[in-house]
């Protein structure tokens, strides 16, 4: 039995940190986990990422953006995500189709119906079992991202605050319309507190899917402490 989990959130919400902690916690249970990202996750997807995020591509139209993110996603699903799920692995993706709905749909105002169709086409209808949304004030997120010397400051980060606020509002609407699939976590909390909330929800998914029977699961705290030590 496989699981597909995606992470979403505005800039600087700490997705990568939480994905790393979750990866270690899942590995402690003996389950195989594959962590990947969008745009990217495949050699072709990573090349598309370069084009999408290059500062010199300021002239890129929103529709071009939507098509390129979706092209990278189609490759990602076909080459990486579906095969891993078929092998019975847990897949954790840093962003997925909801990012296109939020950024290109809500941020740029592209036609939502077309974007839904595009997502359907690119993914063959594959949806995550759980979307973890790390919610954070937009100004605070951009501030954090600017301060993160190891992170990438890209063309999308350069959009104005109103754009990022529309993206966040779009995410919150998506959560409302499908609350069973989404877990909202306040990303202003400590790294530990956020991880614990995510881990509690994943444990419930394990219980439902039978994954937890593979091996006695360690307490998330313990997994976290071991990771940090
Ligand atoms: P990140 O790897 O730091 O999350 O950066 C990815 C950027 O790309 C982020 O600004 C969101 C943006 N993005 C879109 O606009 N649409 C998409 O479909 C995806 C996957 C990402």
Image (spheres, helix red, strand yellow):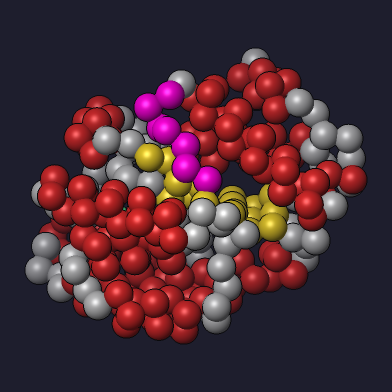
Q: Quadrant of the N terminus?
A: bottom right
Q: Quadrant of residue 82?
A: bottom right
Q: Is residue 214 left or right of residue 124?
A: right
Q: Quadrant of residue 167?
A: bottom left
Q: Is residue 29 left or right of residue 216?
A: left
Residue 57, position as x, y percentages in the image = 15, 64
- Decide whether residue 193 is among the magenta residues: no
Q: Nearer the viewer, residue 151 or 134?
A: 134
Q: Nearer the viewer, residue 227 or 15?
A: 15
Q: Residue at the location (55% across, 81% down)? A: 124
Q: Residue at the location (89% across, 40% down)? A: 215
Residue 26, position as x, y percentages in the image = 71, 40
Q: Residue at the location (49% across, 60% down)? A: 178
Q: Residue at the location (24% across, 62% down)? A: 106
Q: In this view of the protein, can residue 130 be seen by the observer?
A: yes
Residue 119, position as x, y percentages in the image = 43, 76
Q: Is residue 215 left or right of residue 63?
A: right
Q: Quadrant of residue 20?
A: top right
Query: In the image, is residue 52 above or below residue 112?
Result: above
Query: In the image, is residue 19 above or below residue 8?
Result: above
Q: Nearer the viewer, residue 151 or 185?
A: 185
Q: Quadrant of the C terminus?
A: top right
Q: In this view of the protein, can residue 20 be seen by the observer?
A: no
Query: In the image, is residue 227 above or below residue 20?
Result: above
Residue 11, position as x, y percentages in the image = 30, 43
Q: Which residues are magenta?
A: 183-189
Q: Is residue 206 left or right of residue 182?
A: right
């Amino acid at each position: 039995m496989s699981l597909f989990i995606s992470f979403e959130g505005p800039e600087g919400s700490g997705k990568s940190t939480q994905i790393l902690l979750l990866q270690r916690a899942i590995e402690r249970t003996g389950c195989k986990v594959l962590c990947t990202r969008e745009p990217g996750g495949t050699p072709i997807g990573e090349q598309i990422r370069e084009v999408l995020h290059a500062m010199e591509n300021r002239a890129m139209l929103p529709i071009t953006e939507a098509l390129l993110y979706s092209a990278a996603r189609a490759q990602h699903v076909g080459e990486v995500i579906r095969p891993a799920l078929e092998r019975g692995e847990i897949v954790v993706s840093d962003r997925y189709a909801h990012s296109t709905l939020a950024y290109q749909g809500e941020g740029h105002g592209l036609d939502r119906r077309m974007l839904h169709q595009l997502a359907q086409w690119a993914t063959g209808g594959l949806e995550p079992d759980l979307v973890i949304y790390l919610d954070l004030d937009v100004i605070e997120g951009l501030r954090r991202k600017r301060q993160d010397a190891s992170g990438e400051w890209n063309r999308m980060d350069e959009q104005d605050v109103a754009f990022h606020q529309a993206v966040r509002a779009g995410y919150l609407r998506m959560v409302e319309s499908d609350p069973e699939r989404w877990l909202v976590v306040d990303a202003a909390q400590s790294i530990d507190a956020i991880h614990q909330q995510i881990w509690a929800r994943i444990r419930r998914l394990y219980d439902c899917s039978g994954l937890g029977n593979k091996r006695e699961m360690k307490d998330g705290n313990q997994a976290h402490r071991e990771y940090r030590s």
